Image: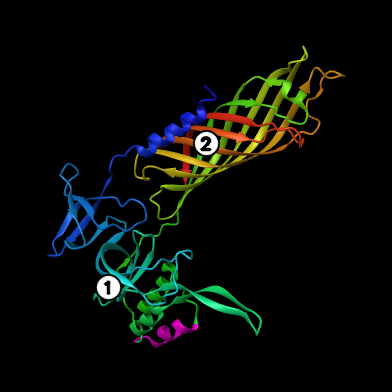
Amino acid sequence: MRNALPLFLLSLLFVCNRSTAQKKYLPGQVVLTSFDTLKGFILEIPGRINPQKISFRPTLNAEPVEYTPLTIQWFSFNDGDRYVSYIGPLESSSLNTNNLTYDSTLTTYNDTLFIRAVLIGRASLYYARDRNDRIHLFLQKFGGAIVELGYKKYYVDEIVIANYQNKIVKRAIYDNQLYKGQLIQAFRDCPYIASGITSKALPYAKNDIQELFESYNRCKGAKVIYHEPKDNGKAVFTLNAGINFCRLQFISESYPPWNDYHFNGSTGFAAGFSCDYLLPRTNGKWGFFNEASLKNYKTDGYHITEENPVALDLIYFKVATMIRYYFTTERNDWRPYCAFGFTNNLAIRDVNLDYTSDPEGEPILEFFRHYEQGLMIAAGSYYKRWNAELRYETSNGISDYTSLRSPMKTAYILVGYKLFSL
């Protein structure tokens, strides 16, 4: 059973990944091109790619209706994000430094998608991430046409050394910062804002450019009628407890007698306190998980050439660090997830006795590894405040001899309770 647990975990992850969670419709409103407002329920936006269509229900039991940027002006979730229809050109180049070209000219293609409002006022800022995972920023003034702020990165070959014998060329990355000129032109009616654009660093980043838009609206005494809800992520704190099944093996190619030790499987306890930091703007689907826990390993065994037994009685302080992926969002009661990462373990009790020794009861390992490292995978699910989880860990074990490996494989069955979140 224990040997089959890693396969079972992988199978569970596959099943979770293939399963489709119940679609979640959230309260919101849709404004049609005819300016009519429909209130009802909108299917939540999965992932971070901006949608090209949405599904809307007047009531939760009604049949869904699909809308595109061609049929509505904007939509919003109650007390949540607002999305505006965009029909027009988008820059096609990648911002990935491995996929750049030597062409500095902006190249666009026509597209339709819903872009997310960052702030709406006299000068409005919008944000989008397209199907190629490229970021786009947009400008709108006085409620007029929405225009993309142009930006492109490209390669340039720079001559590093050049003389009559050698010429060394290094590839550098430059950028076409058309957006700065667009912003200077748009904000020219507030001279100190416009002039400051050229004199300071202004990266093509939502937060930096948002500050500029806020400054401009303040300069003109204009009211900002919408700010996107702030999402700084959330930390979830949980108590976990359960049992562990552990097996230790000695493996040595240079000294075969080590291979004659046999250790029985161990059943012990595991208990810990964890913090799962749910990353911003992921709908709670990605988390950075850290846990501090205690785990014991108590077993006996024997050396096959001797009659007397050996015994181990170990307690570890364990720190597990993993990346978690949830297959449903924070708004769902059932939240299956998978995780992978690494562990760092410190032995705070290290009784290891060999009763075949002379004198009897000497340590099995004179050089005992107190700091153990491992890899871990996990799968489980929350239901409201409770969760159940299976884990599998493989670590480098207790031997600090270079000629002796001591892999330790541990399976965990844990139950957790969500204490609070920040």
- Residue 285: image location, x then y, percent: 41, 47
Mark nearer the N terminus (2 vs 1) = 1
Distance, label 2 to label 1, CA atoms, is: 49 Å
Q: Which stretch appears magenta? A: 189-199
Q: Residue at 46% of width from left, 34% of height from top?
A: 10
Quadrant for residue 316, please give it: top right
Q: Are marks 2 and 1 in contact (CB under 8 Å)?
A: no
Give the residue displayed 80% in from the left and 17% down from the top.
355
Left or right placement of residue 396 versus residue 413 in this view: right
Q: Which mark is residue 239?
A: 2
Q: Amino acid at mark 2?
A: Leu
- Name the amino acid, label 1: Ile
Viewer-nearest residue: 291 or 345: 345
Residue 396 located within the stretch drawn in magenta: no
Tally of numbered discs: 2
Percent from the top left, x then y, of residue 286? 44, 48
Against 251, is 153 above or below? below
Residue 207: tell me if it is visible.
yes
Q: Residue furthest right?
A: 359
Q: Secondary structure at mark 1?
A: loop
Q: Is residue 302 above or below residue 111?
A: above
Q: Nearer the viewer, mark 2 or mark 1?
A: 1
Provide the residue designation for mark 1.
Answer: 146
